[in-house]
Image (cartoon, coloured by chain):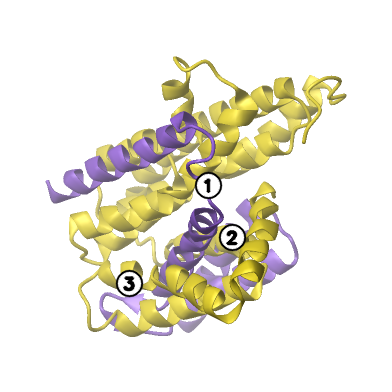
């Protein structure tokens, strides 16, 4: 699929791309720090999330669910399901990076949307490794620094709602979601999930409606399978598979 | 204490799935159905979360300045603005609407 020899892309260009992504997204840790502190978490708890969880959507989801009065394990379950996509990123990356097994536990923490996007865009193993490492390092360092700044600064900022910072969380989710809405199935899943999430909000305990809304995904797959004859359904799945190349 | 339990469970779970991805033999997660589900689950979760964090005030649904902020983010996304600008647009517009409507 990719030629491993003569990738032809200079290291400096790979580093520049990786830094661009790492810096832009790393700085948005500030919004997470403010949101988390505004949700009632301490500075230590906020920083622990960025250091240990380090996958932005899961972090925002967790503090959002906790702020909404959710049960801690329900909140953690929602954050966990959001993190499951990283397993699929890891699967692709393990082929491309070809890391020694002893190194993999250390590389694992950096397996996220952004490092995967940069690494998959590279033409050779060397540039995949450079792209992954530079993006991961920049993003990890900046995300944690700006999380700390945001959490500490949240008090100085005062009423975070007056500054509109409560809109940062949903905007981050929307930015992550938008590129995924490519086909009718994805849009149908998103629409059904919105209806379920909002409709069940007043009647189910906090955090549970999001988990129920996740059922829109298997439901859509079931409908898809019923609509198309078996062989066509399989072909569609195969055609769709490389899409997460991005 | 409850919050630390949630943080611990999330940290362990999220690290485990990252590591599993790097360690499993090729092919286990490559079944088309599993891949499709893995691609669709984040869509459902992100959509539900976006809606809730825009319209929820505790267990009550409300329409407030956040809706204008999210609309600004959507416009920024359609214009292919970078990530930070999308988030910034949502924050600034939400704050602006609140300042104007007091």
Residue A103, image x, y percentages: 47, 17
Q: On residue B11, which mark appears?
A: none
- Looking at the image, tell me whether mark 2 or mark 1 is earlier in sequence order: 1
Q: Mark 3 lies on which chain?
A: A
For numbered disc 2, what is the local secondary structure? helix
C-alpha gap between disc 2 and disc 1: 12 Å
Nearest-to-viewer mark from 3 and 1: 3
Specify the quadrant that holds the N terminus of chain A.
top right
Label 2 packing within 10 angstroms: few (<14), some (14-19), many (20+): many
Sequence-wise, the earlier of marks 3 and 1 is 1
Q: Residues within 10 Å of mark 1 (few under 14, many from 20)?
A: many
- Of marks 2 and 1, the one in the foreground: 2
Residues at marks 3 and 2 touching, judged by CB atoms closer than 8 Å: no
Query: Which chain did the image draw in purple?
Result: B
Instruction: Residue under label 1, please give it.
Output: A28
Q: Which mark is residue A212?
A: 3
Picture residue at 67% right of the left edge, 28% below the top: A131
Q: Name the residue under label 2.
A: A175
Q: Nearer the viewer, residue B69 or A17?
A: A17
The chain that appears yellow in the image is: A
Tell me the distance, in whole angstroms, between the alpha carbons under discs 3 and 1.
29 Å
In the structure shown, which secondary structural element does the residue marked by tag 3 occupy?
helix
Residues flagged by tags 3 and 2 on a common chain: yes
Q: Is mark 1 on a helix, strand or loop?
A: loop
State which tag comes first along the sequence, 3 or 2: 2
Residue B12 at x, y percent in the picture? 29, 38
């Amino acid at each position: 699929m990719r030629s491993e020899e003569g990738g032809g892309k200079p290291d400096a260009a790979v580093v520049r791309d990786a830094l661009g992504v790492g810096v832009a997204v790393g700085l948005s840790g500030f919004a997470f720090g403010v949101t988390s502190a505004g949700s009632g978490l301490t500075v230590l708890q906020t920083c622990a999330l960025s250091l240990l969880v380090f996958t932005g959507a899961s972090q925002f989801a967790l503090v959002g669910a906790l702020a909404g009065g959710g049960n801690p394990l329900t909140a953690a379950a929602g954050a966990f399901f959001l993190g499951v996509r990283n397993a699929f990123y890891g699967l692709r990356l393990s082929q491309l990076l070809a890391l020694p097994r002893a190194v993999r536990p250390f590389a694992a923490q950096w397996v996220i949307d952004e490092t995967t996007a940069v690494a998959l865009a590279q033409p050779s193993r060397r540039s995949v490794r450079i792209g992954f490492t530079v993006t991961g390092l920049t993003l990890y360092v900046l995300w944690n620094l700006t999380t700390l700044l945001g959490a500490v600064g949240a008090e100085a900022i005062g009423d975070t709602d007056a500054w509109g910072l409560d809109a940062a969380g949903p905007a981050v989710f929307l930015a992550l979601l938008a590129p995924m809405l490519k086909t009718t199935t994805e849009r149908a899943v998103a629409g059904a999930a919105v209806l379920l999430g909002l409709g069940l909000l007043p009647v189910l305990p906090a955090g549970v409606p999001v988990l129920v809304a996740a059922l829109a995904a298997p439901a859509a797959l079931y409908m898809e399978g019923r609509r198309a004859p078996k062989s066509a359904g399989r072909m569609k799945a195969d055609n769709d598979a490389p899409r997460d190349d991005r | 204490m409850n919050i630390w339990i949630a943080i611990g469970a999330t940290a362990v779970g999220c690290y485990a799935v990252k590591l599993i991805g790097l360690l499993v033999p090729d092919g286990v997660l490559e079944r088309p159905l599993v891949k499709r589900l893995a691609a669709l689950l984040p869509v459902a979760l992100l959509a539900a979360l976006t809606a809730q964090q825009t319209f929820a005030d505790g267990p009550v649904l409300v329409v407030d300045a956040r809706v204008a902020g999210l609309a600004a983010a959507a416009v920024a996304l359609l214009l292919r603005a970078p990530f930070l600008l999308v988030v910034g647009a949502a924050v600034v517009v939400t704050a602006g609407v609140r300042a104007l409507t007091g």
